[in-house]
Image (cartoon, helix red, strand yellow):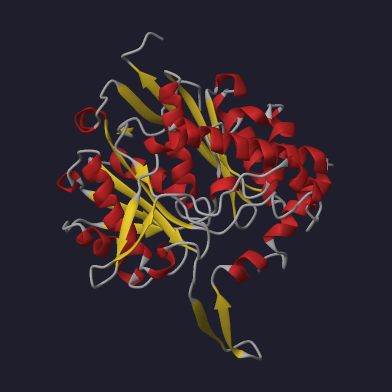
Amino acid sequence: MSRETTLYPRARIPYGTWGTSFFPAWQTSALAEVNIGQFAAESMNRILGLRRVSTSALEYLILGSTIPWHWKFWNAPMLAATFGRRIPGFHLEQACATGLQAVLAAAAQVDGHGGDVVGVLTFDRTSDSPVGVFPERRAYERTFALNDVWENFGFDPATGKAMIQTAGAAARKHKLDRREVDEVVFCRYQQYFEAKNSGFLDKVCVPLDLLSVQGKPMGRIDQDNGVKQITMEALREMRELDTCVTAGGQTHASDGMATLLVTTKERAAELSPRPEIDIKLIARTEVRANPSMMPEAPSLAVQKLFARTGFTMDDIAVTKNHNPFAVNDVIFSKLLKHDWKKVNRTGCSLVWGHPQGPTLTRSLIEGLEEAVMLGGGRVLLFGCAAGDVGIAAIFEVTDAGRKQ
């Protein structure tokens, strides 16, 4: 693959037709009380209305979620019906890679003439995740109960290790300094609050109201609940849970949704409030790191992507990643020889949380908005997922209305 290649030549993301909810932390909002799929679809309808895009334009719907929700069997057709559309679609999941995989799937759908306007809807609710009871005839228990979120976080069936242990193992392998990891955490919180105070998040996150089945107000989702200012002194005093890993240096479970459209260049110009902005997907890749080395997998994915395309960090205008552990960012800085202060300049999942399905979708929307603010450029998006997986993609933003 060369630097000039466009992975899906027909596919475009229309600028300004996207949006996300805020991501309240586990059990801190009314989102813990609702069917997250229905909420996500109703919120997509609300966001598209605010963006002046009629849902009648949608021809296909791709869902991305990882935690079972009520009526998940019906997935895309059910949620499309929530906003009055009888269109086809499908559901996919790959832990925290889901948010990017859904966008890639939508681009492939458009490029393969499966629909000219494809809606991407990603969501998850970690709060009160269901407990499944599975028959296991080969096991002495005969039945096995699994808490979908917490037990999967705590046990990789391929290695027997918890996710937090992957962070400690990767920190030891790369000989990370706890002081530098704490500095990354402090920087990430500063970046988030600077973006929030500047009004940047208003371009991304949409306040949403929740109603009960009786139509009574349940609450308004208008903050990333659980995100608080943090001091370096407090970080220094935190106990290490594993090598270089503290409570402050890892993300938290949260709830939320994110949505965007993928369409053709012609339809993007019709749907976007700024048709002069062209957004296309240049390249993508995935890798699988060695066992229990999840935090280094994203960096390996970026290295592989650059080797295939010829790009370097000098060719990238905006860098965004899903960083459930701060050690991810220090490893990336070491392997790519890139200043971690230049990554996630408008916020990241380390700070605003980890609802899994929509995590990378929100990161992508933030990255595209930042690139538009800069007048265009390439956006590098990458992250890790359960199973020591790393995923990475490059998007290109061109603003024909500005001199290049």
**Does the rendering let one see residue 27?**
yes
- Where residue 134 sits in the image (x, y, percent)? 52, 83
Q: Residue at x 17, y 44 (%)?
A: 54
Q: Residue at x 35, y 40 (%)?
A: 107
- Where residue 32 sits in the image (x, y, percent)? 44, 67
Q: With respect to residue 294, does 38 lie above or below? A: below
Image position of 84 (left or right of 258): left
**Residue in the foreground of this view, choosing between 24 and 53:** 24
**Residue in the foreground of this view, choosing between 338 and 219:** 219
Q: With respect to residue 200, does 145 lie above or below? A: below
- Where residue 246 sits in the image (x, y, percent)? 74, 53
**Residue in the foreground of this view, choosing between 241 and 64:** 241
Q: Residue at x 52, y 27 (%)?
A: 318
Q: Quadrant of the C terminus?
A: top left
**Does the rendering let one see residue 394?**
no
Count all numbered tags in the image, as a single digit: 0
Image position of 151 (left or right of 279): right
